[in-house]
Image: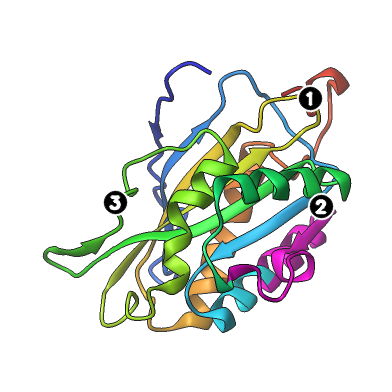
């Protein structure tokens, strides 16, 4: 893949003041028009299992309403999967297990950094990094699971969702990445719902996973 470029997307008039999440950056692989997965694994990276369950449940439900075959990571991973950090070798083995189970895509979401109204108070070292492969992304950011004090008393969360292809005999490369700011993190239920709504809208606009009108079969899943 050539050096990744990021296309900033300003959403004007789309999100009203009652919406707590906003898409601030949006990148799509230049060689892909549309991508329809046979089975996608939804992963949320957060130190709070309850929040992760809520996010994955809401996102999977929203995808299924759009006729996408989506599965929560809680349904696929062993119960103790996130109890310890994984090596790169273990993540390679995980990708093999996903292929055997019929998955051909992963939708990974994580919070990368937080800031207050004036200054940045904490941010993960990978905030400005774009990962081409799911394995690298998960490996470098899994420490988020274990930082229990990360989410206290901040005003804005900088989150990111990435769609990876794990198609057989093809590179496990990045298809799409969207950066979303969450402005009301203290209201978890509302923040998750708004985030999911923005994410679903973005995927639908980009004709990724959610394909409303299929005009050229050769363009589907051609990555």
Left or right of 170 in this view: 12: left
Percent across and percent down for residue 222 are 77, 22
Percent across and percent down for residue 103 are 81, 46
Q: Is residue 70 magenta?
A: yes
Task: Please tell me how crowded label 3 is: few (under 14), some (14-19), or many (20+) other residues with Cα within 10 Å.
Answer: few
Q: In the picture shown, does residue 127 fall above or below 182?
A: above
135 and 210: which is toward the camera: 135
Percent across and percent down for residue 15 are 45, 59
Which residue matches tag 3?
Answer: 125
Residue 189: mark in rendering: none
What span is colored magenta in the figure?
57-82
Residue occupying image coordinates x 54% and y 57% = 109
Question: CA–CA distance between discs 2 and 1?
Answer: 23 Å
Residue occupying image coordinates x 17% and y 69% = 117
Question: CA–CA distance between discs 3 and 1?
Answer: 32 Å
Task: Please tell me how crowded label 2 is: few (under 14), some (14-19), or many (20+) other residues with Cα within 10 Å.
Answer: some
Q: Quadrant of the C terminus?
A: top right
Which residue matches tag 2?
Answer: 68
Percent across and percent down for residue 18 are 43, 73
Give the mark nearer the N terminus: 2 vs 3: 2
Which residue matches tag 1?
Answer: 169
* Front: mark 2 or 3: 3
Left or right of 100 in this view: 190: left
The picture quadrant where one finds residue 147 is: bottom left
Left or right of 196 in this view: 104: right
Give the mark nearer the N terminus: 3 vs 1: 3
């Amino acid at each position: 893949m050539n050096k990744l470029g990021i296309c900033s997307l300003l959403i004007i008039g789309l999100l009203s003041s009652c919406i707590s999440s906003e898409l601030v950056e949006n990148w799509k692989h230049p060689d892909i028009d549309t991508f329809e997965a046979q089975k996608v694994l939804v992963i949320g990276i957060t130190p709070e299992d309850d929040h992760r369950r809520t996010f994955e449940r809401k996102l999977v439900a929203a995808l299924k309403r759009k006729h996408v075959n989506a599965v929560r990571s809680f349904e696929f991973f062993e119960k103790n999967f996130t109890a310890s950090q994984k090596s790169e070798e273990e993540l390679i083995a995980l990708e093999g297990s996903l292929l055997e189970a019929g998955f051909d895509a992963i939708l990974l979401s994580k919070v990368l950094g937080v800031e207050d109204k004036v200054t940045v108070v904490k941010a993960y070292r990978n905030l400005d990094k774009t990962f081409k492969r799911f394995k690298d992304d998960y490996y470098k950011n899994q420490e988020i699971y274990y930082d229990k004090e990360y989410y206290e008393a901040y005003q804005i969360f900088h989150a990111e969702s990435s769609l990876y292809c794990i198609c057989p005999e093809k590179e496990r490369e990045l298809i799409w990445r969207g950066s979303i700011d969450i402005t009301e993190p203290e209201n978890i239920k509302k923040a998750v719902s708004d985030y999911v709504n923005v994410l679903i809208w973005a995927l639908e606009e980009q004709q990724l996973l959610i394909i409303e009108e299929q005009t050229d079969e050769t363009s589907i899943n051609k990555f």
